[in-house]
Image (cartoon, helix red, strand yellow):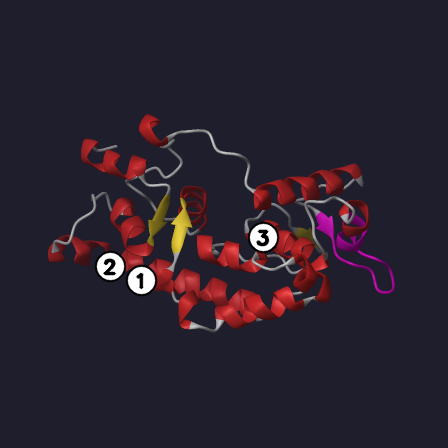
Amino acid sequence: MRDDLTCWDYVPEFTGRQAALAIVGEPETDDPATLRKAMPVLDLMRRAYEGTRRWFADAPEDDDTAPRGLLVSVEMRGKADRTSAELAAAGAGDVRFLTWLRTPMADFDRQTFTREVLARWVQEVGASSLYLFTCPLAQSTATPKPMQRQRAQGLVILEAIRQAGHDPLRLRRNEPGKPGIKAQVFAAVKHDPIFTGPTVFNKAWLRLSGDGDIAFID
């Protein structure tokens, strides 16, 4: 990795422009020629994000496997769970999330992306990146942080799937008239205080699907 790319080691979350510059091997800059160099990558990211936005807006079914190349933003993840326990229990969280997706606040230029999401996206679209997003943050910013609530929710679900005797990456689709694996898992974890209602569980399940941590087979 070029020495002048170490500036990105201090960035925990990237804007689309920052990510595109890092991918083409450039530091942060306002130089027009350098920005033109990054434009094809930025356009590819924009299309991927808008495709992700449409996929969520279409309210995929529980057993819909997320397509490869989804680009899920930090704001998208946060908005999906930004609901009170009462709203979640009433099922209003979905409405708020879907409404947000259709507002200018969900536009690509207002989003940021984690290092993990960017590393996965680069791999899934078969792109090459001159910057490795998986490298750790520089020591000056590498203060340990508590496990995020969303990550903890995902781990609880994955463990419940395994406890039920299933491989999270090889789940079978629901049989007509029978409860599916998602219903089984929810019954097993619904009393866990990390889930405040079915909507929070549904969003955690959807995140796992979007991140490729759970998948269904035919």
CA distance for labels 3 and 2: 28 Å
Q: Residues within 10 Å of mark 2 (few under 14, many from 20)?
A: some
Q: Earlier in the sequence, mark 3 or mark 1?
A: 1
Q: Is residue 187 left or right of residue 149?
A: right
Q: Are marks 3 and 2 in contact (CB under 8 Å)?
A: no
> Does residue 146 belong to the magenta stretch?
no
Nearer to me, 127 or 179: 179
Q: Which residue is mark 3?
A: 207
Q: Determine if the magenta segment contains residue 175.
A: yes
Which x, y percent locates residue 103? 45, 73
- Locate residue 136 relative to residue 89 in the image: left or right: left
The residue that appears at 54% across and 58% down in the rendered structure is 67
Q: Quadrant of residue 85?
A: bottom right
Q: Position of residue 46 (x, y in %)?
A: 36, 62
User: Label 3 amino acid?
Assistant: Arg
Quadrant location, the N terminus: top left
Distance of label 3 from label 1 (alpha carbons): 24 Å
Foreground pick, 29 / 145: 145
In this figure, which residue is indicated by the disc labeled 1? 43
Amino acid type of the residue that numbered disc 2 sits on in the rendered structure: Met
The residue beneath circle 2 is: 39
Q: Is residue 72 left or right of residue 163?
A: left
Residue numbers of the magenta segment? 171-185
